[in-house]
Amino acid sequence: MKILWILPYLPWPMTSGGKTRQYHLLRTLSERGHRITLLVQSKTEADAGARAAIEPWLERLIVIPRRPLKHPMTVLAGLFAPWPLLTTINGLSRALRQCFDELLREPWDVIQIEHSYSLQPYLQPLLNTSRDFVLTEHNLESSLGGATYDRFPGWALPFVRFDQWRCRRWERKAFNSARHVVAVTETDAHAMRQLTATPVDVVVNGVDSHAFAGVVAAPDSQRVLFVGNYEYAPNLDAVQWMLEDIFPRVWQTCPEARLAVAGYALPAAWAERWPDRRIEWLGFVPDLPALQGRCALFLAALRHGGGSKLKVLEAMAAGLPLVSTGQGASGLVVRAEEHYLAGETAQALADAVVRLLTEPLLAARLADAARRYARDYHDWSVAGDELEKIYRTLPSAEVSPLCA
C-alpha cells in the first residue's frame, strides 16, 4: 500500500515511548513491502543521524520546522483559539498546510495521522477533499491532562478548566472526522468509544523481542532501573516519588540497593537535590540492553499517564523482574505474582523491591513469565498485523495478497 504517515515529531532518536512506537511500526510496515511517505513537523532538525536511521524505511521523508514554543502566535492562540493548548503548539502552520495540500493531490491507500493534537493543519483539507484517514491516539489527552496541568500554578486553574473543555471538544471532532481511530490499549479504546461512533480498535504497543532476548539480569548488582523521558510529567512524578518515599524504605532493609535513573532530558538539578551515592544519574542511554544487563530489576512507580508503557515492555522482554503500580502495568494482560509484583503505596512498592532483591528464585520465575508474555503478545510483528487489519477495512486500501 501507498501510505502517507504524519507525525508531530521525528521518530529518531528513540527518546520516548511514542518515538519508539513510530520507528518500529514504520520499520515493520516497510519490511512488509508498504511504500511510506513520512511527513513530520519537528522542533529539531533532521540531522544526518536521524536521516540515516529513518530514511531506509521510507520512500520520502519531509520535515517541516515547528515554530518556537514562545512564538506570539502560539501564545495568543493558546489563550484565545478554540483549540486546546497542545493543538495550537502543533498547529496553525502555513508551511505545513501548503505541503499537505500538495501531498493530497497524490493517490494514497492510507493516510495515517498520529495524535489528535497534531490534526489541526490537516483536518479541513481532508474534509474539503472527502479523504478518509486513520487517527491514532496514544493517550486520551483530555483525561491525561491532569498529570500535566498539576504543574500549573493554582492561579491558573480557570485556564486549566477552559483548556480541558477545549481538549474534550476537539477530541470529539477529531474522532468523528476520522474513518478509523486507533488506541494502544483496550481501556483507552473503551473511553474513546464513549466520545464517538467512529470505529475504535487497538494496535498494541510492542517491543523488539529479538533485540532484548540476550539480556540476562544481574541480581547481585542490587541495582534497580527506571527509564523515562523527563519532558513527560508522569515520569518526573515517578522519580520524585521513588526518591522521596519509596527508596528510603528500601534502604532500611537493603542499604546497598542502588537506583539507576536513565532517560532523555534528565533534570540536572536532581543530582544536587538527591546527592546520595547510591543513585546513578545516567541520562539518555543509547544501548539500553547493555544497561539492563547490569540491573537486578525494573521499578515502574507510575501514578499518572495513559496507554501501555514501552519501558515496561522492554524490561519484561529483557527478563528484568518487574515491580509496578497498576498504572505502570496498564494496557497489559499481566497478573500480579505471576508476571510481576504489584503495589500502589510507597510501602508496598518498597516491600516488593526488597522481595525481589532478596528472593532470587521468585525474581527469576516472574522474569521468565514476563519475557514470554512480551514475546508472544507484544512483539512489533503483532502490532503490524493489527494495523494492517485496520487498513484492510478502508475503501481506498489496496492490500496485496502478501499482506492479506
Image (spheres, helix red, strand yellow):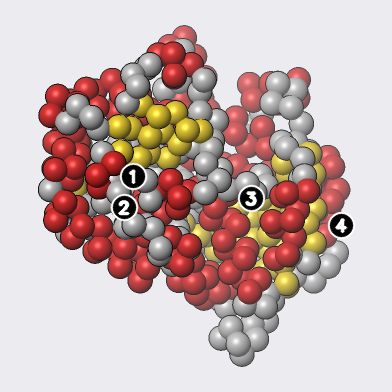
Disc 3 secondary structure class: loop
Name the quadrant of the N terminus.
bottom right
Q: Are marks 3 and 1 in contact (CB under 8 Å)?
A: no
Compared with 386, 245 (above or below) is: above
Percent from the top left, x then y, of residue 223? 30, 38
Disc 3 versus disc 4: nearer the observer: 3
Residue at left 84%, top 54%? 101
Vertical side of 181 occupied by 276: above or below: above
| Circle on res. 102 | 4
The amino acid pointed to by label 4 is: Glu
What whole-number distance in Å separates the C-alpha atoms at marks 3 and 1? 27 Å
* Residue for badge 1: 295
Q: Which residue is mark 2?
A: 217
- Residue at image position (59%, 56%) is 22
* Element carrying mark 4: helix
From the viewer's perspective, is 383 left or right of 29?
A: left
